[in-house]
Amino acid sequence: MNDRPYKVFKIDNGTVIDHISSRMALKIIDILKVQEQGIISIGINFNSKKIDKKDIIKIENVYLDKKETDLIALLSPNSTINIVKDGIVIEKRKIDMPKEIEGIIKCPNPMCVTNTYHDCSTKFIVVRYDEASTILRCYYCERETPVLPMLIQ
Ligand SMILES: [Zn+2]
């Protein structure tokens, strides 16, 4: 690949998620539940100075709040968030690992109450995390699991 500067469609208003770990963009869209909101531009496998390859997501006319963007930490803790209004970045935000995750991740334990009762939504406590993985503990059955893309509901 040459050094041609690849660009994702510029947005004047909305949320830009940059420095996403490579190939996580589509799963992050799932986590954020923004599929139905506004126009979403996705760039996958961009060259990056900061990390080897990165993905970028731009969500037009949607301003994600801190609680929402912190969910991105589950899959890509080094991502950065820019909130853009009228073509100007009005907020540069870093993401923090949430302490609890509700209703995003499915418990891997088939006997867990969250898998046997339809009206019981999942809840996990973040036990520990590092660059490589995030470990969650189910609030109900106490099963520990790393965050795997297949567990995202
Ligand atoms: Zn469970």
Image (spheres, rainbow, N blue to C red):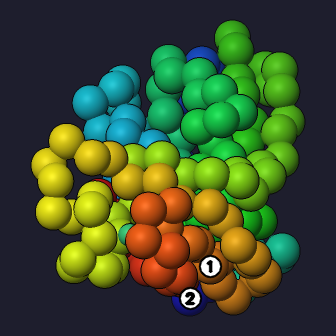
Secondary structure state at the residue bearing disc 2: loop
For residue 5, side relative to residue 109 (left or right): right
Task: Mark 1: give few (<14), some (14-19) or many (20+) Cα within 10 Å.
Answer: some
Residue 20: horizontal and vertical position, in percent?
A: 63, 64
Task: Say what amino acid the circle numbered 2 marks.
Answer: Met
Above or below — where is 5 with respect to 51?
Answer: above
Residue at 44% over, 62% down: 140
Of residues 120 and 49, the one drawn nearer to the viewer in this rendering: 120
Q: Is residue 104 above or below residue 1?
A: above
Above/below status of 48 relative to 5: below
Inspect this view and state whether residue 42 appears.
no
3 or 65, which is in the foreground?
65
**Which of the two discs, 2 and 1, sits closer to the camera?**
1
Q: Quadrant of ligand 1?
A: bottom left
Residue 129 as seen in the image, left or right of residue 54: right
For marks 2 and 1 on the same chain, the one whose residue lies earlier in the sequence: 2
Could you tell me residue 99's position as x and y percent?
71, 53
Residue type at numbered disc 1: Ile
Tell me the distance, in whole angstroms, between the alpha carbons under discs 2 and 1: 36 Å
Q: Quadrant of residue 39?
A: top left
The quarter of the displayed image where residue 132 is located = bottom right
Residue at 32%, 47% in the rendered image: 121
Spot occupied by residue 43 in the image (x, y as percentages of width and height): 48, 59
Q: Could you say where residue 100 lies in the image, as x and y percent from the top left?
A: 63, 52
Q: Quadrant of the C terminus?
A: bottom left
Q: Residues within 10 Å of mark 2 (few under 14, many from 20)?
A: few
Q: Residue at x 33, y 65 (%)?
A: 106
Residue at image mark 1 = 135
Disc 2 target residue: 1
Residue 49 in sight from this viewpoint: yes
**Nearer the observer, 5 or 146:** 146
- Camera-side residue of 45 and 26: 26
